[in-house]
Image (tube, coloured by chain):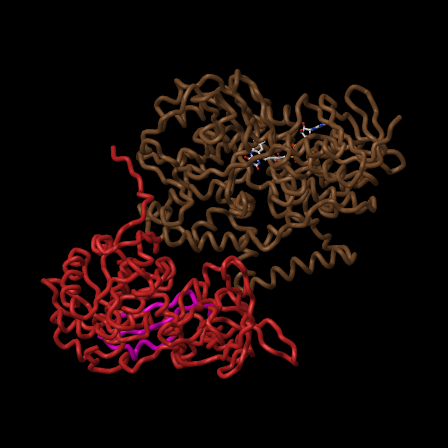
Chain colours: A red, B brown
Amino acid sequence: MTIHEVPQKRLTTPFYPRLTELDRLNNWHSWKGYTSTDALYDPELEYFAIRNSTGVFDLSPMTKYRITGPDSLDYINRLVTRDMNKIKPGRVAYAVWCNDQGQIIDDGTIFHLREGEYRLCSQERHLPWLVSAAIGFDVSIVEETAEVAGLAVQGPTSFSILRTLGLSGIEELKPFGLTHFDFEGSELMVSRTGFTGDLGYELWIEPAKALALWDALFEAGKLYGITAIGTHALEMARIEAGYIAAVTDFLPAELTVRSGRSRSPFELGLDWLVDFKKPTFNGRRALAEEKRRGSNWRLVKLDIDGNKPANHSYIYTKKNGKRIQAGFTTSAMWSPVCKQNIAIGTVNTPYGNVGDTMQVEIYYQREMLWTRVMADAVVVDKPFWDPARRRATPPGNY
Amino acid sequence: MKTYDAIVVGAGHNGLANAAFLAKAGLDVLCLEKNPYIGGAAVSLNLYEDWIYSNCSYVCSLLRPEIYRSLDLARHGLQVTPYGGGMTFMENGDYLGAYWDSETRYKEYSRFSKHDADAYERYSADTMRQCRFIRDFMMRTPPDPTSFKPRDLMELMAIGKKFYEMGEDRMYDTVRFWTQSVAEYLDEYFETDVIKTALSGSGIIGTALGIHSPGTAYVLLHHYMGEVDGNVGAWGFARGGMGAVSQAIANSFQSYGGEIRTNAGVEQILVKNGKVTGVALTSGEEISARVVVSNMDVKRTFMKCMDEKDLPEDFLHRVKNFKIRGSSGKLNIALDGLPTFPALPKGSPLLDGDMHFIDSMERMELAFDDWKEGTWSKDPYVDMLIPTITDPTMAPPGKHFMSCFVQYCPEKIEGRAWTNEERDAFGKTVIDQIAKYSPDFKDLILHVEIRTPQDIENEAGLTEGNIFHGELTMDQLLFNRPVPGYAQYRGPVKGMYMCGSSTHPGGGVMAAPGANAAREILSDLKRQNTVPENFGDD
Ligand SMILES: Cc1cc2nc3c(=O)[nH]c(=O)nc-3n(C[C@H](O)[C@H](O)[C@H](O)COP(=O)(O)OP(=O)(O)OC[C@H]3O[C@@H](n4cnc5c(N)ncnc54)[C@H](O)[C@@H]3O)c2cc1C
């Protein structure tokens, strides 16, 4: 008789052997049960690799679903708020999906791999939700997190590295495009996507070929400053890019227990993802109502005075000459490339219009002593970091 | 002759908590207990050599932390240690393990269904949402919906506000939830039989209802409502057995100058001119008091210990119809060593927790069918724990105490009293079921205490042995508990109060009924309130 026992140990990704070889810090955390690195040798320097050369990040633990079948387009169109008709094969879409109350269940990227064949990538797991939303559609939904290994290859030299790797035609790949290559007899999918707001790609391959891909990639990148990075560096780049992160900047609606703690797409500044021209999609009625009535919350990007990061800060505004609490920050940092003190936060409407000056309450510690400062913060609408090279097609060499 | 400010009848943990808060406010309080020991159903007894049994209740979670803190129970000797683990053994040789760590749970559930592994997160959030809705009311007196007193209106509005805040869809969920069966509720999330079965147990523990009976979803919630150190839903062991809870409250009570008398059963609560005057003991002794508080369940209080003539007829009628059916039995076992379970890997930490031997919803329902037919379940739902894996104080080193809570077990066998042979056969049913999964278990047994609801009634004084002092169904909750119009701990006679588990928020070792009743009494006596408010927003 077999005795079952699930391991309580964290799982490892297909790239783990290479990561441990490079690891000098032994700083690991769990990402959906997988061993994931905070940083391998220095978080700050890893961050600069993203901005100056190329950082390689293991994103295999990302939750992935394969959606196929004759109704897959209709199904996904029902699921997400944006119009997926516009996302042709070979294209990738950032999307959010909502419950019937118009509250965001999660955000993610949808890869239109081939006609009628999609991959959905997200932070959280959603199988029961995806399955129940599929009732009446001829689609198949398969969780394939462990079946696909993924690497983010991000930074100004990433294009040169992939070209050196022999991915011919990669120069034509536009932002949010995807294409397939042969890698040692396996299919390598490459998308021009990422979480860094810079030139960059994501590489997807079957786990058996993961290490061979890693080795070939690092060989190709030898002269281009290729550097393996951890979550810490990626998180810095993510905030500079002005991207929101599930669980950090918003909570998946189905997991909130207190009322008013979930968010609609409008409340996260994602109006452009909601397409009311679609006759039906989950949450449409509630979102139309919210559009009419107005939202409760607003996501703001803040450019803050001084250099003390506004982590866990209250945001204030002036009302009739009095200072009142308007919200709180959810992500904050000193940006080394922008030389700016930046934050993402949530405020109550009607506050936080672009151009408004608000105040943030910052606590910082120096040699034990805590100091509190109130700093002015201007609401901005552009990403903090948005270099032209990010969009250039063909991309520059570095 | 001395007149006490208050007499509390019964030294169950609620009686003691009530007495402690009254004494803390400076009242002169006497607590009377019929048994030679205190604690009621929260008791530790030594029946065999150096073993200590948690004879009735065996695990702690519901005890309100506000009360724990304000009665200084830590200083008075109470220590509650949480445990992890637990499993459901399956007939096919496999098992379903319970893990705190969400990723390990995900992996374990994924062995059966990825869908269910994912669904757990949502199930857990939805359950927590319902839980939060009512948890806030545990340390509050239920409003009287027919009253126009400002306080009742405010409380009703507070409930209404919380309800409204949930949002339209969640309001519907809540209304449905309160009347749903645990099976229906679980069906909305899970597809795997053994996963549903493992989760359904909490919906029927202590309840004369089956998994398909409406109202059992709420019972599930009742078991999730507690916490250990802020870990909502977590359960733990009171070091030294559940009697340690009662003992610590008693110590606290005595530190405020309170007096406890054991072997002092109350025969009658005395009433003169529509007002309470004191009590008469079974010994014939009379003791006078301005206030009498009953820790006994409502049936025992009003039908056994008060004169019917002193009570309103309508009230009495409702008390007679109060649902308080016995449905649970218990085995307490002294073991010569730790039994082995071949289905589990050696040294599995799952053994720290609650073990179960029913793996399908069908078997759960069949277990209930036996009870309906007036006998014990031949394939019972057993909630089995070995507290001595965690607690070094309850058995000699290397030896163990095993607690087996058994659902279902009727108060009467086909309408008549239990015979000794039947009690033994009931015990054998439980032991045989466990032995199926542990071949060395029977050889390790040194002593067994078998308790039917009838025994529980006779010893601990719970009518019909109902562990909650009355069913936790919607018609007997909140402002309906124990009976409509009397949910604010005041009896129908002036100076007479109720503080046992028959009152809001109900049974379990939570001490909230005792505390809430004390707040009402102190308010009537125009004394300063000593009862804490709930911590809120947990
Ligand atoms: C077998 C069993 C297992 C349980 N398991 C758990 C568990 O694991 N966790 C949990 O939280 N809850 C559990 N419960 C429920 C919980 O134990 C009870 O709901 C709770 O202890 C009741 O407390 P109480 O103070 O309201 O009443 P009781 O504990 O019933 O106290 C009433 C007291 O009054 C005394 N008394 C009765 N009549 C008289 C009289 N005429 N004169 C003087 N004294 C009198 C009794 O002897 C008793 O001491 C269990 C209950 C049982 C029976």
The residue sitting at 86% across, 31% down in the picture is B3
Q: Position of residue A229 (x, y in %)?
A: 28, 62
The residue sitting at 37% across, 57% down in the picture is A128
Picture layout, residue B171 above or below residue B242? below
Picture layout, residue A91 above or below residue B5? below
Q: Quadrant of residue B278?
A: top right
The residue sitting at 42% across, 42% down in the picture is B197
Q: Is residue A84 left or right of residue B322?
A: left
Quarter of the N terminus of chain B within the rendering: top right
Q: Residue furthest front?
A: A367
Q: Position of residue B365 (x, y in %)?
A: 45, 39
The residue sitting at 43% across, 78% down in the picture is A271
Q: Nearer the viewer, residue A368 or A106?
A: A368
Where does ligand 1 appear, by image quarter?
Answer: top right
Which segment did they paint magenta? A82-111
Q: Nearer the viewer, residue A278 or A160?
A: A160
